[in-house]
Image (spheres, rainbow, N blue to C red):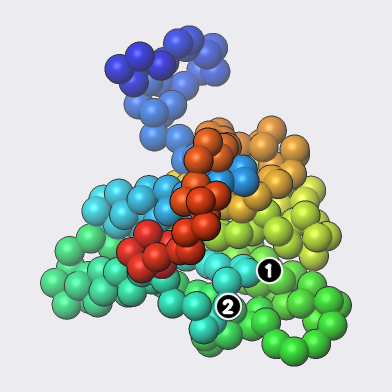
Amino acid sequence: MPQGVPTAVPEDGLTTRQRRNRPLLVVHTGEMKGKSTAAFGLALRGWNQGWSIGVFQFVKSAKWKVGEEEAFRALGRLHEQTGEGGPVEWHKMGTGWSWSRKAGTEENHAADAAEGWAEIKRRLAAEAHGLYVLDEFTYPMKWGWVDVADVVSTLAERPGHQHVIITGRDAHPDLVDAADLVTTMTKIKHPMDAGQKGQRGIEW
């Protein structure tokens, strides 16, 4: 796609404008860091367009503070105070969200993940957000906590203009097939290979 020009024009009956504005399912997968970071970069663009942003973190602990969360919460407050950008909701395990990871069995965690996905389905049906980041959502799918076929069909049939970004390693092949944009993060080099631990401003 040199200079953003499509390599082919499908015979789908859509106008150029309709095709250009079609809502996308985006998957960031692979072993290397940067999957969530790239997703949050897209969410920043959506916020700037005035879209409602919904971030849902399925694996990260509630005690783990990430820089993007604080930044997006600040942007949400800015929208409330000035109307600039769009509204922001950020949900993660253990902070007022129903799929809080707690001490218990794998069955507990599976039930919590399924409940979280059910809530996202309700929001999709209600067209609650313009852009969803389902952070590390590939893992509940991989572990069998959430039905892959249900995810794929729900996303394929979502109404309105709702972009969805899913991150995490080992994305299921059916999810990859259903996606409009798939990026695999492949490691070439990493500071940890040389014994360097993660650092402030880079990893969190």
Q: Quadrant of residue 106?
A: bottom right
User: Residue 159: in sight, yes or no?
Assistant: no
Examine the rendered structure and indicate whether residue 86 appears above or below residue 14.
Answer: below
- The amino acid type, in three-letter code, at marker 1 is Ala
Structural distance between the alpha carbons of marks 1 and 2: 20 Å
Q: Quadrant of residue 115?
A: bottom right
Q: Is residue 73 left or right of residue 91?
A: left
Q: Is residue 61 left or right of residue 37?
A: right
Q: Classify 10 Å Cα crowding around label 2: few (below 14), some (14-19), many (20 and above).
A: some
Q: Residue furthest left?
A: 82
Q: Is residue 112 left or right of residue 203?
A: right
Residue occupying image coordinates x 42% and y 71%: 66
Q: Position of residue 36 (x, y in %)?
A: 48, 55
Q: Quadrant of residue 201?
A: bottom left
Examine the rendered structure and indicate whether residue 8 appears above or below residue 155.
Answer: above
- The amino acid type, in three-letter code, at marker 2 is Ser
Q: Is residue 179 left or right of residue 21?
A: right
User: Residue 176: in sight, yes or no?
Assistant: yes
The first of marks 1 and 2 along the sequence is: 2
The residue at which mark 1 appears reads as 118
Foreground residue among 104 and 204: 204
Q: Tag 1, which secondary structure? A: helix
Foreground residue among 15 and 44: 44
The residue at which mark 2 appears reads as 61
Q: Tag 2, which secondary structure? A: loop
Q: Quadrant of the N terminus?
A: top left
